Amino acid sequence: MTIKSSTKTATSTAPGDSAEPPEAASPATGPAEAGAGMLARRPSGPRSISQRRVFTSILWRDILVTVRQPWLFLAESLLQPLFILFIFGKVLADMSYVDESYVPLLLPGIIGLAAFISALQATALPLVMDFSYSKEIEDRLMAPVGIRLVALEKIVFGGIRGFIAAVIMIPVGILVLGVPWWSASSLPPILGVLVLGSLLGGAFGLVLGTLVPARRVGVVFGLALTPLMFTAAAQYPLLSLDGLRWFQVVVGLNPITYINEGLRAVLLHKVESVPLGIDIAVLAAATLVAAVVGIRGFSRRALD
């Protein structure tokens, strides 16, 4: 009697439980079915990891990698714009090849250009390497976060790098050129324009990073960056090109132009510039379009 009672207790099931053996114990269940069952039983709702938290963690990881290599970041971001400022704004001005009034005009353009180019390079070049050689992007795609958020993180991270590079260039450029310091009241609109310009660079970087094959990245970047840099109104105001109407149209079609025009509209009231409201509207629209195109390209590459 005792033996029978013990056996019943061991094999009995709790109320509401199925008397059938679990799927994992069934010999007909293979690894694929077991994995699908685990995915189906993944906790959701309050117990699941917040996608915002995962997004923030990925972003902080990229920021920490940059912080650990500060000199590399500074060299990549500041070397080219610093040399442009020094040659065109200092050397040529001291040799009287350019007028003194040109120096304050040059600084906002180079700072805006630094914001865009730094953000573009920080997004596009690593992305090409991740998809082609290192395959590090696969680790991020396995994170519990949507593919579009992974792509958005790339844009935001590139924008942060571009914004920091531009902010560092402000005091460096002022000291190199010897121009007066900018007023504190002009800083909020300046920083707003730089944020939009940096995000635009990150979005353009996502587009290039997902469209350009690794074997052609050098050629495409050389062909793309040079026209973008010299048609961005960095060295001249857009509205001063009335004598070259066709070139004025080309420069007006370049969205980077409105970063530089926006900075000049805030800083140089004596120089005729595109109104700040138009600059902000164009930058916001261009950033949105580039982000949509880049995220779609990223999703397509990720699912291939």
Image: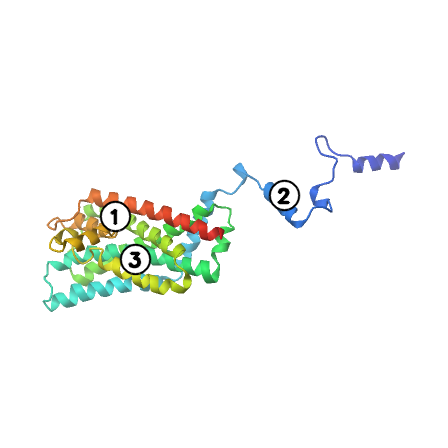
Badge 2 crowding class, 10 Å Cα cut-off, few under 14, some 14 to 19, many 20 or more, is: few
What amino acid type is highlighted by mark number 1?
Val
State which mark lies toward you, 3 or 1. 3
Q: Is residue 288 left or right of residue 171?
A: right
The quarter of the displayed image where residue 176 is located: bottom left
* Nearest to viewer (mark 1 / mark 2): 2
Give the CA separation, mark 3 to mark 1: 15 Å
Disc 3 or 1, which lies upstream in sequence? Answer: 3
Q: Quadrant of the N terminus?
A: top right
The amino acid type, in three-letter code, at marker 3 is Ile
- Residue designated by label 2: 37
Q: Which residue has dot 3 on it?
A: 117
Residue lying furthest right in this view?
Answer: 1
Q: Which residue was labeled with disc 1?
A: 193
Please give left or right for residue 302 compared with residue 73 in the image: right
Q: Residue 46's spot in the image, x, y percent?
A: 52, 37
Give 184 or 218, whichever is nearer the viewer: 218
Instruction: Count residues near mark 1 (Cα–Cα under 10 Å), then give few for <14, some for 14-19, many for 20+.
Output: many
Q: CA distance from mark 1 to mark 2?
A: 50 Å
Image height check: is 190 above or below 127? Answer: above
